[in-house]
Image (cartoon, helix red, strand yellow):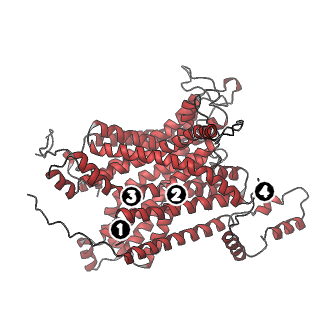
């Protein structure tokens, strides 16, 4: 199936028009940041020399966002800092979705003790506070980008596992799955051909959420100085601005932009997830306290 | 043409036996969770490369005898499982070890820190829940209008901001009017109750406000979708058909039934809240459990770090049990 959202939710005219706008804004924002991150990596942009005469120099026409505590251009730092956030966000979310998807599939498809054990483990990881645990693990294990991806990934898989498990559990009871089974289809065939297509759209929504959570967790870890020594990212920019008295110097231009960048990316992830969810579950729009009129306004191009 | 179905027979109130076994099962799961936490907490600090003595004995001229003495003194020469048994035994007696930096029992330090964390987080959660539920209900009631769009998007955007950044932004905005560091004025000579109370209150505002700002967004979104879902139920349609006013439908039918996912969410968000309070306490130098954790990490103070993580995790697990009990009160059908 090429576009799961389309095949599941054909009721297009009922959907508010803002959904599509939101979706495109979210995708556009995420793509822009990914391109900037990849570009900064490919072009090998460096933070520039340390210049003590420019410490916390305010914004000017040539340097839109001024200079940081080492006299380096903030715009340039923002561009370089996008790489760790984007790469950790995407990779940690991939790790989380992979672990969560596998565990959810296995738990949902198998009944009995295996399901029960996996469910308990999942519940445990849903409840456990991720950030303090991640802090302890990175504090003891040491930190660099790849370890951070692993640590965040293994702490954020539980939500995906739970959602997938529930969907698989109801999916395997559907009549056509039962029929395939009666015709002699093995579990692998059923999972790949019948269960996965039901689960994939759900995974896309929890995946977008996982990207957001991974980036926020990474920024928090970096705020505590647990992001690795030589990593330069939005999270470390906030850390250094806080630690090196940007507030006392009224240097808002050091501290506001990295937070806004994180905020923008995360919002885009949430919007993407919301749009995917409402595409999967069109019933979310139909409940209403007002008097409902069922006359559909037709737009050109719609089938009457 | 819609067919009208008969309503399902009203469920029998569950007997006290089912409620008891439901509770017993939940408590069993919580006990398992706490045991898993303790075990994880022990092995996390043991499997890692290099023990505490390895770094302590790295003094110039430190001999092999010194290392052996230190190992024996800390019990690190015993087999791992014996150490685990020692850990469990000491934990049972409330002994979490000795903090490297303050040289006092970790238990004392942790209890003192929790005493500071509780009022700050409680105030923050209360504000967040009040704001979240009221905006969420408003958005659901005004579903599809500009109010709904504004509330939903503001909630999403604010919820997207990193907690440490929100904290710094609030400091930037309010540091002229409110203290932004510590839990009380260290230079104050006040001894009377009211000035002391006002001083504490002024200190608690910014940290609690940060926590509330950081987490009200998810309450708004979940309340909105939960109320929307109940507004689509048949009994709401029936009430509408009978001509009940919208306010009565909302407050007597929709909101009480929408509460269950909200209570569950508040409990599940405790983990995030504890993570957020670690960040907030670090920014505002609030002498709570989160700041203790941060300082333990920078000082390599492993006993305190281990104790703080244990207390944070166990308290979150217990909070979830509490939510299960509250949900059982709200909706007795849950036990079946």
- Give the vertical position of A279 relative to A168 (above or below): above
**Residue B334's disc number:** 1
Residue, disc 3 = A203
Q: Please, which chain is the residue tagged with disc 3 on?
A: A
The residue furthest top is A61
Rendered location of residue B318, percent (x, y): 52, 63
Q: Tag 1 or tag 4, which sits nearer the N-term?
A: 4
Q: Secondary structure at mark 4?
A: loop
Looking at the picture, do discs 3 and 2 lie on one chain? yes
**Residue A153's disc number:** 2
Looking at the picture, do discs 1 and 2 lie on one chain? no
Observer-nearest of A287 and A259? A287
- Nearer the observer: mark 4 or 2; the answer is 4
Q: Secondary structure at mark 1?
A: helix
**Residue B103's disc number:** 4
The reply, left or right, for residue B249 in relation to residue B297 is left
Quadrant assignment for the N terminus of chain A: bottom left
- Give the vertical position of B85 relative to B49 (above or below): below
- Nearer the observer: mark 3 or 4; the answer is 4
What's the CA distance linking mark 4 and mark 2?
A: 36 Å
Residue drawn at (8%, 57%), measured in percent from left and top?
A: B1
Residue drawn at (58%, 53%), measured in percent from left and top?
A: A148
Q: Please, which chain is the residue tagged with disc 1 on?
A: B
């Amino acid at each position: 199936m090429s576009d799961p959202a389309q095949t599941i939710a054909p009721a297009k005219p009922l959907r508010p028009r803002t959904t599509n706008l939101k979706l495109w804004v979210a995708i556009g924002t995420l793509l822009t940041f990914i391109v900037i991150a990849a570009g900064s990596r490919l072009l090998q942009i460096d933070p520039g020399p340390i210049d003590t005469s420019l410490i916390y120099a305010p914004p000017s026409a040539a340097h839109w966002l001024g200079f940081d505590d080492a006299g380096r251009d903030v715009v340039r730092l923002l561009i370089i800092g996008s790489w760790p956030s984007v790469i950790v966000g995407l990779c940690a979310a991939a790790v989380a979705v992979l672990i969560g998807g596998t565990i959810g599939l296995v738990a949902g498809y198998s009944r009995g003790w295996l399901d029960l054990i996996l469910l308990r483990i999942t519940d445990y990881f849903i409840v456990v506070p991720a950030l303090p645990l991640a802090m302890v693990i990175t504090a003891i294990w040491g930190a660099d980008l790849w370890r951070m991806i692993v640590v965040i990934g293994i702490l954020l898989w539980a939500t995906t596992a739970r959602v997938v498990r529930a969907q698989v559990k109801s999916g395997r009871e559907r009549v056509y799955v039962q029929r395939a089974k009666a015709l002699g289809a093995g579990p692998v065939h059923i999972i790949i051909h019948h269960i996965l297509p039901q689960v994939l759209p759900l995974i896309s929504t929890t995946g977008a959420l996982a990207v957001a959570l991974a980036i926020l967790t990474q920024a928090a870890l970096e705020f505590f100085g647990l992001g690795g020594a030589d990593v330069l990212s939005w999270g470390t920019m906030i850390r250094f601005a806080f630690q090196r008295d940007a507030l006392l110097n009224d240097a808002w231009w050091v501290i506001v932009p990295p937070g806004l960048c994180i905020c923008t990316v995360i919002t885009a992830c949430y919007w993407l997830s919301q749009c995917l969810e409402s595409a999967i579950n069109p019933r979310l729009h139909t409940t209403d306290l007002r008097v409902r009129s069922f006359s559909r306004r037709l737009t050109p191009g719609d089938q009457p | 043409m819609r067919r009208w179905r008969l309503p399902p027979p009203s469920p029998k109130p569950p007997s006290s036996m089912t409620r008891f076994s439901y509770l017993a099962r939940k408590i069993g799961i919580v006990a398992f969770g706490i045991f898993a936490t303790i075990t994880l907490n022990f092995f996390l600090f043991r499997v890692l490369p290099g023990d505490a003595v390895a770094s302590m004995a790295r003094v110039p001229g430190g001999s092999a005898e010194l290392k052996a003495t230190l190992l024996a003194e800390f019990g690190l020469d015993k087999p791992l499982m014996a150490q685990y048994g020692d850990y469990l035994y000491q934990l049972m007696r409330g002994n979490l070890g000795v903090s490297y930096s303050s040289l006092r029992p970790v238990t004392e330090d942790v209890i003192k820190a929790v005493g500071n964390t509780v009022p700050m987080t409680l105030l923050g959660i209360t504000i967040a829940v009040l704001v979240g539920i009221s905006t969420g209900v408003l958005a659901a009631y005004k579903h599809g209008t500009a109010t709904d769009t504004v509330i939903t998007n503001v909630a999403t955007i604010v919820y997207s901001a990193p907690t440490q950044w929100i904290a710094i932004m609030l400091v930037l905005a309010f540091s002229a009017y409110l203290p932004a560091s510590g839990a009380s004025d260290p230079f104050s000579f006040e001894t009377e109750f009211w000035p002391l109370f006002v001083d504490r209150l002024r200190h608690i505002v910014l940290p609690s406000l940060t926590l509330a700002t950081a987490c009200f967004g998810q309450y708004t979104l979940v309340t909105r979708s939960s109320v929307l879902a109940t507004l689509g139920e048949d009994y709401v349609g029936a009430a509408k058909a009978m001509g009940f006013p919208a306010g009565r439908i909302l407050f007597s039918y929709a909101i009480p039934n929408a509460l269950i996912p909200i209570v569950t969410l508040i409990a599940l968000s405790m983990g995030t809240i504890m993570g957020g309070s670690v960040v907030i306490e670090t920014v505002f130098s609030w002498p709570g459990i989160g700041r203790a954790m941060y300082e333990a990490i920078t000082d390599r103070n492993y006993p305190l770090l281990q104790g703080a993580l244990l207390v944070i995790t166990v308290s979150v697990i217990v909070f979830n049990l509490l939510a299960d009990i509250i949900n059982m009160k709200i909706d007795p059908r849950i036990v079946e």
